Image (cartoon, grey):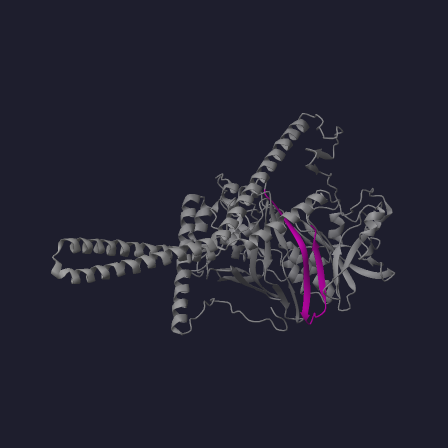
Amino acid sequence: AKAKAIRAIECEEEEETESAHVVPSQEISTVVRDLTDRLENMRTCYDLITKHGAALQRALNDLETNEEESLASRTKIVNERATLFRITSNAMINASNDYLHTAEAQGHKWSKMLHHEREQRQRLEEIIEQMAKQQSQMEQAAVLVRQNKPVPSSSGAGTASSLVTSDEEMEFFDAEEHGYSGSGRSPESPDRERGTFILKMNKRRSSSEDQVEGHLEGSSSESDEQKRTVQTVQQVCLVSAPRVASGGQGDDDDVDKALPAKQSTDSIYGRNWNPDLIKKRRDRVPDKPNHPISLWGIMKNCIGKDLSKIPMPINFNEPLSMLQRLVEDYEYTEILDYAATCQDECEQLAYIAAFTVSAYATTTNRTGKPFNPLLGETYECDRMDDYGWRCLAEQVSHHPPVAALHCESKNWTCWQEFSMTSKFRGKYVQINPLGGVYVQFPNSGRRYAWRKVTTTVNNIIVGKLWVDQHGEMEIRGSQAAEGHKCVLNFIPYSYFSRDVQRSVKGVVMNKDNEVKWVLRGTWDMKIEIAPVLSTSGSASSPTYTTGEFKLAWRRRPAPPDSDKFYHFTTLACQLNEEEEGVAPTDSRLRPDQRLMEQGDWDESNKEKLRLEDKQRTERRRRENEAEEAAAEGRPYPAYEPMWFKREKEEGSEE
């Protein structure tokens, strides 16, 4: 697995290096235009040569047939015609030389581009062949498993925990372990009862602050070589204090009992849950029709490109705009409502961390792509009657696509600027969000900011699509919370990890970089938090004794049959529900999105192309007007959003 990972990294580096030398499309267009102009000059010279050659031929014929007394004048005419013919011939020679030199100068670039294209397509053919072989072998293995026959391995010794496909390709599938212990020890082991929790604290090279990566304790039988590879890692042991209630630490019922009284029910946080006062909304959307299409047939020419600039059919979409998808981040704002009541900054930061994780809850099975908002598109959502917040989002830039969002409640205000870069790498798509997210509590004057982690969509070519979140998220406090921070580590999915998959681990530190709270859980199910009660051990390997873990967030169950309507949650089903009085630019009024929701996908595709062509035409018009204004020396006003204004963040370069 390590060798495969190294080869994959090297291949990606080679691909990026080669793509850096590929001739950009703008330069290619310039060269083609230059060669076309020179070819047109050669055609003009050819016409002139033909014309003056015919005139010279006529003059020579006249010279032979006319009388001797007019010989001098006829000779003069011949000389003039010959001079013109010589001039046009020289012009033709010069134009041909220019064309030849330009073509030769660009020849190496064309050959390099063709060579890169040939190698890229060869790699794709190898990938497809390899994937086809793997799929065939896995299908054969699945048949044997269903027939209760042993799966053959290359070594001749089959095992139940591994599937060996060939000498070169080996994939191992470990049995999934439940609970948060990374080891294979029994629940009765002393460490399990105490809830031992190991953190790796890595020293940043660029600053003096600690970068904290939380992970649960693994097998105690580490090899000496493994221990030597973590010489720069400070291991911190956290031991949970004895529980007051009986039962195992991982029991959800006991965790719920340990929650504060005002956290154990949804009828708090200042919401109005009176059914008579809550607006009646739908709880599902029409079922998704079955329109199969080959994703690889569309994506094979998109490798290495930014997916935000590639027109895609709605077959890969879900009937929501990206603006509406961003609003889904606020489905679990009861966590922020409770965080607003916390007096301690570190405890408040622990709940904010749980809220940031909750935004990824639906991405486990939501593989549909939201509609790209049009420039100036808005979305207004007022849920003061049940969720206790209202928000407004707007697409403020087209290239690059940027969305701005503002959400406010009684006790907090949240806003974000969302943009992203995406690359298609053959087997997977990687999405890197840009822009910051902010939340402020006006009563305490505390403010926090963070950036979202990387999202990867796997199995683009063969198999079922699945999504993984990975990377490090740092939540920093400012103003009244200056100096406090939380570091969350979204651990990548791995076949070989003994940890629970999709796990998230992190710590909350105060101004003095002292760990005060720890977090653990998964980004698709729940997050638990616990305070640090005491510290013991040496400075290089301290041990923190924590209090009882309590539930900070748990994912709500999906609606019945949600797999039939895009795996939408109840909130997602209500976001595109038609409402009166919305702005003409509101996402609910997009015809292509509405047609897709109603199941008319053919008309939706046509409408989507029409809207995108209209937007491109408008962009070209503005670009032409800007060029004309620049040529005339007058200013041209840039596009300004309707509801948002771009300003520099106080005390930073953001």
Residue displayed at 46% across by 68% down: 640
Image quarter of residue 144: top right
Picture coordinates of residue 74, whole percent (x, y): 17, 60
Quarter of the figure with residue 173 = top right
**How far across and down, in percent of the image, does residue 464 sit?**
59, 40
Q: Is residue 620 left or right of residue 250?
A: left
Q: In what quadrant of the picture does the C terminus appear?
A: bottom right
Q: Residue furthest right?
A: 537
Q: Residue at x 80, y 42 (%)?
A: 184
| Chief SS of the magenta region | strand
Q: Residue at x 70, y 37 (%)?
A: 170
Whole-percent x, y for residue 2 in the image: 72, 45
Q: Which residues are magenta?
A: 465-491
Q: Is residue 268 magenta?
A: no
Residue 493 in sight in this render:
no
Left or right of residue 573, residue 618 in this image: left
User: Between residues 455 and 253, which one lies in front from this camera angle?
Assistant: 455
Q: Nearer the viewer, residue 277 or 480?
A: 480
- One can see residue 84 in this view: yes
